[in-house]
Image (spheres, grey):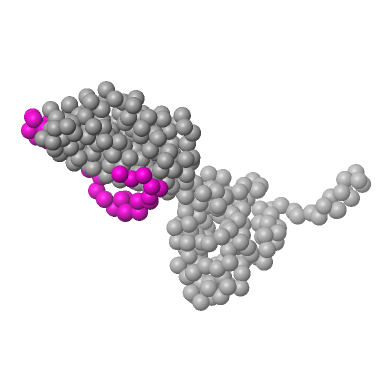
Amino acid sequence: MSTSNEKFDSPLSDLELPTAIEPPADRASTAILREIVAHLRQRRAQLLEAWASRISEAGFLTAMSAEEVLEECGAMYDNYLAAVETGSSKSLDSYAHELSERTVTRGVGTHEVVGTVLLLRDVLAKSLYAEYGQNQDNLTRVLGAYGPAASRIATMVAVGFVREHEHIIRQQQEAMRKLSTPVLTIHERLLILPIIGILDPQRARQLTEQLLEAIRSNRAKVVVMDLTGVATMDAPVANNLVQTVGAARLLGAEVIITGVSPELARTLVTIGVDLEKLATVGDLRGGIERAARLLGYKVVPIDETTTDTATE
């Protein structure tokens, strides 16, 4: 029995998720499983309390309140018994998905979920032992039917939770990447794309997609791409940047690059970029002024505007 705060670091996400628990084909074994489930349902309240106590002792699900733990235990208990009785994984698959959505963002780890399921398996096995232990033949018959089903359920829940966990994390990472490369509408037909942090190939491709979509939806004519926050860039990403500028030009938008660091300048020269195809300005302010001129706007100093207003 697992009573310690043990972590389960097996590569569960690489396992093939079972589609069924493979219930016994013979009627005798099926009848045994139904008898087991009836016994466990009759003692539901008592076993839930014992299970919740074991979860607390092991230090699992600490991010959840006691009421939430009991509610989750009740749902998992019922789905668990249904899977033992029917051999179907559908309810468990659905439950693993819902459990992931509720707990991943709250910091509940995979080892906690796996440990919780294993504790349930042990609590139920102990109850079966107390019920049938006086007769060795009956005990062997019951545990022989329950053991394989319980182990397969534990694997099923673990793999399902890990996969849903990873899916949710990927969605969160995608949202964070979008927030880290915002395309800002500064003026009619003028966009600014400030890039901060490391540009890897995946983020570079995403940046290209976001920018081209923003150009199309805003009917932009000029884009100021500021690289002040990018310290370094490898050759493949630099090539992607040049291709992005070319794609923007095909959509009718001129791209002005600002804030190029010495390291990035050396990279662009090393990979043989035709620098005549890139419009560069030293800093963001200069890039905005150049963009304004391209759009036909007159850049007027604030003091001059104030004087003109006072004269009128």
Residue 297 against residue 130 in the figure, above or below:
below
Residue 102 against residue 35 in the figure, above or below:
below
Does 248 sit left or right of 55 as displayed?
Answer: right
- The percent coordinates of residue 185 (x first, y second) are 62, 47
- What residue do we see at 56% from left, 70% from top? 264
Total tally of numbered discs in the picture: 0
Q: Classify residue 20 by image quadrant.
A: top left
- The percent coordinates of residue 249 (x first, y second) are 52, 58
Residue sitting farthest toward the top = 42
- The percent coordinates of residue 79 (x first, y second) are 29, 31
Q: Quadrant of the C terminus?
A: top right
Q: Main secondary structure of the magenta part?
A: loop
Residue 35 against residue 125 in the figure, above or below:
above
Does 99 sit left or right of 21 as displayed?
Answer: right
Residue 43 against residue 247 in the figure, above or below:
above
- What residue do we see at 45% from left, 61% from top? 201
Q: Is residue 312 visible?
A: yes
- Relative to the observer, which residue lies in front, 110 or 269? 110
Magenta range is: 1-30
- Relative to the observer, which residue lies in front, 3 or 212? 3
Q: Is residue 243 visible?
A: no
- Relative to the observer, which residue lies in front, 242 or 94? 94
- What residue do we see at 50% from left, 67% from top? 238
Q: Is residue 28 magenta?
A: yes
- What residue do we see at 8% from left, 30% from top? 28
Q: Classify residue 9 by image quadrant.
A: bottom left
Q: Classify residue 85 by image quadrant.
A: top left
Q: Quadrant of the N terminus?
A: top left
Residue sitting farthest toward the right = 311
- The percent coordinates of residue 10 (x first, y second) are 32, 54
Q: Is residue 100 magenta?
A: no
